Amino acid sequence: MTHDALDRRQAVATLLRDPGDLLVVAGLGAPNWDATAAGDRPLNFCLWGAMGGAAMIGLGLALAQPARRVLVLTGDGEMLMGLGALATIAVQAPPNLAVAVLDNGRYGETGSQHSHTAHGVDLAAVARGCGWRAVCTVTQAAELEGLRARLRQEPLFAVVRIAPEEAPRVMPPRDGALLHHRFRAALLGSEN
């Protein structure tokens, strides 16, 4: 698979610009660092582990908070590890959940080996096969503004093809309990 030169950090900054009350589940590794670089905020739930779990965490959050928009921002390696989530989310069909997969064709967390998407696995086609009604693939920077709007308005599975170059890491706090508690307080209020 060849990738156009979409810069991952810039793509995520565009997608997360002016997030308002958007609930963001950022998968481990680069999506986590890019969400933090775009603006560390209590309504970002950044994962430090649980590879393959971001989409299912997003599903649970969307079902528990049906009046709130939820965006899962994850990578191709993590999505490949949690493919079953695509079928479960399609069957549940929460209207307030969108998933954006940053696909660089690499397993960034384990040494940047080529992922299955680099060998032809098409995550958008997999999502369609699982029953997702709205699926898209973005390869150009000019498409990001439209994607940004769609991610906040409709249930959508989006693949964003990015270049494999690494950006400097911008880390959220490493304390999982702190991340959990600040997210919960921002979502439900400090007394819950």
Image (cartoon, rainbow, N blue to C red):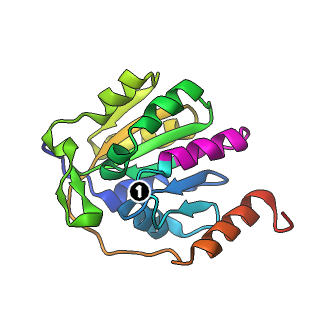
The structure residue drawn at horizontal position 51% and vertical position 32%, both measured from the top left corner, is 88
Q: Amino acid at mark 1?
A: Met
User: Which of the two residues, 81 or 43, is positioned nearer the viewer here?
Assistant: 81
Q: Is residue 69 visible?
A: no
Image position of 59 with respect to 50: above or below: above
The residue segment tinted magenta is: 55-71
Q: Quadrant of residue 152?
A: top right
Exactly how many numbered labels are in the figure?
A: 1
The structure residue drawn at horizontal position 68% and vertical position 70%, both measured from the top left corner, is 182
Image position of 171 with respect to 63: above or below: below
SS class, disc 1: loop
Q: Position of residue 85 (x, y in %)?
A: 46, 38
Q: Quadrant of residue 191?
A: bottom right
Which quadrant is home to the C terminus? bottom right
User: For residue 69: magenta?
Assistant: yes
Q: Position of residue 36 (x, y in %)?
A: 48, 68
Which quadrant is home to the N terminus? top left
The structure residue drawn at horizontal position 21% and vertical position 42%, both measured from the top left corner, is 117
Image position of 79 with respect to 16: above or below: above
User: Which of the two residues, 14 or 111, is positioned nearer the viewer here?
Assistant: 111
User: Which of the two residues, 169 or 49, is positioned nearer the viewer here?
Assistant: 49
Q: Position of residue 86 (x, y in %)?
A: 44, 34
Mark 1 surroundings: few (<14), some (14-19) or many (≥20) residues within 10 A: some
